[in-house]
Image: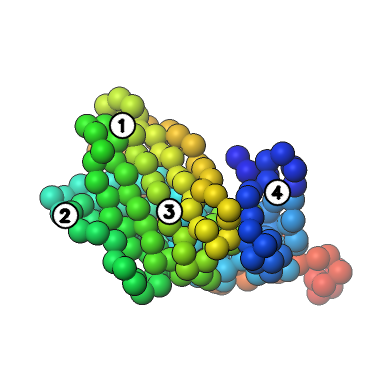
């Protein structure tokens, strides 16, 4: 995986990308700050968006296939996405959306490829605070290894921020669960986050009575 703290594994940032990444203050990675000092949009319960939904807190995912589309139902924040499979192209000038606009197709009997564009620039690529622009294109490649196993590869292509495409997730394995598998609820709660900051996230010197 990319590691901005290791010169041999840094992402291929453009000059604009290097400036953009400095503005983000993640609570994870080599550039991490204290939880109370982060400007990560997720901690204020903004949607994760794409491709971060695939790259952070990706837990149980339900996949529903219909004749016209595929639905992805995510456990984290109870988010759902639509990938259109009716032959349409991605729009030429899409409105920005948290999760963009996705179309997909089968490239062979075992591999489904989805392309997503029109992504809101307020979101981050991942929890490490890597940025993207309005030119971001995300490719998801779902490969059916066997009846009960699926692999997901995610590729980032954003010529404004990165000089070349890069792989953010390489063949993450999914195992098929029973039909009666109960998916737990994970909701971003502002009140619970405030309580976390009060008890854990804020520096000790700022805690009242401490």
Which badge, 3 or 2, is on the more N-terminal residue?
2
- Is the residue 97 above or below the residue 89 in the image? below
Residue underneath mark 4: 4
- Is the residue 32 above or below the residue 94 in the image? above
Q: Residues within 10 Å of mark 4 (few under 14, many from 20)?
A: some
Q: Judging from the image, what secondary structure is the residue with disc 4 in?
A: loop
Residue underneath mark 1: 144
Whether tag 1 and tag 4 are in contact, CB under 8 A, the answer is no
> For the residues marked 3 and 4, what is the alpha-carbon distance in whole angstroms?
20 Å
At 49% from the left and 37% from the top, the residue drawn is: 170
At 48% from the left and 53% from the top, the residue drawn is: 157
Q: Quarter holding the C terminus?
A: bottom right
At 20% from the left and 52% from the top, the residue drawn is: 85
Q: Quarter holding the N terminus?
A: top right
- Front label number (1 vs 3): 3
Residue underneath mark 2: 86
Residue underneath mark 3: 138
Which badge, 1 or 3, is on the more N-terminal residue?
3
> For the residues marked 3 and 2, what is the alpha-carbon distance in whole angstroms?
19 Å
Q: Is residue 209 left or right of residue 70?
A: right
Name the residue nearer the viewer: 32 or 79: 32
Position in image of residue 91 (x %, y %)? 29, 66
Q: Is residue 37 left or right of residue 75?
A: right
Q: Judging from the image, what secondary structure is the residue with disc 2 in?
A: loop
């Amino acid at each position: 995986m990319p590691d901005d703290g290791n010169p041999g594994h840094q992402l291929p940032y453009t000059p604009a990308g290097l400036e953009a990444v400095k503005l983000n203050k993640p609570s994870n990675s080599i550039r991490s700050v204290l939880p109370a000092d982060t400007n990560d949009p997720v901690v204020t319960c903004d949607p994760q968006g794409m491709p971060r939904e695939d790259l952070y807190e990706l837990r149980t995912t339900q996949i529903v296939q219909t004749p016209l589309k595929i639905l992805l139902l995510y456990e984290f924040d109870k988010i759902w996405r639509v990938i259109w499979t009716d032959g349409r192209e991605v729009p030429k000038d899409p409105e920005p959306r948290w999760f963009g606009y996705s179309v997909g197709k089968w490239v062979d009997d075992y591999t489904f490829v989805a392309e997503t564009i029109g992504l809101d620039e307020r979101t981050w690529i991942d929890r490490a605070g890597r940025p993207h622009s309005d030119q971001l294109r995300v490719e998801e490649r779902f490969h059916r290894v066997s009846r009960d196993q699926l692999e997901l590869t995610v590729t980032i292509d954003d010529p404004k921020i990165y000089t070349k495409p890069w792989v953010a997730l390489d063949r993450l394995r999914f195992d098929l669960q029973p039909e009666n598998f109960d998916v737990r609820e994970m909701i971003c709660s502002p009140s619970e986050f405030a309580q976390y900051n009060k008890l854990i996230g804020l520096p000790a010197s700022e805690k009242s009575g401490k």
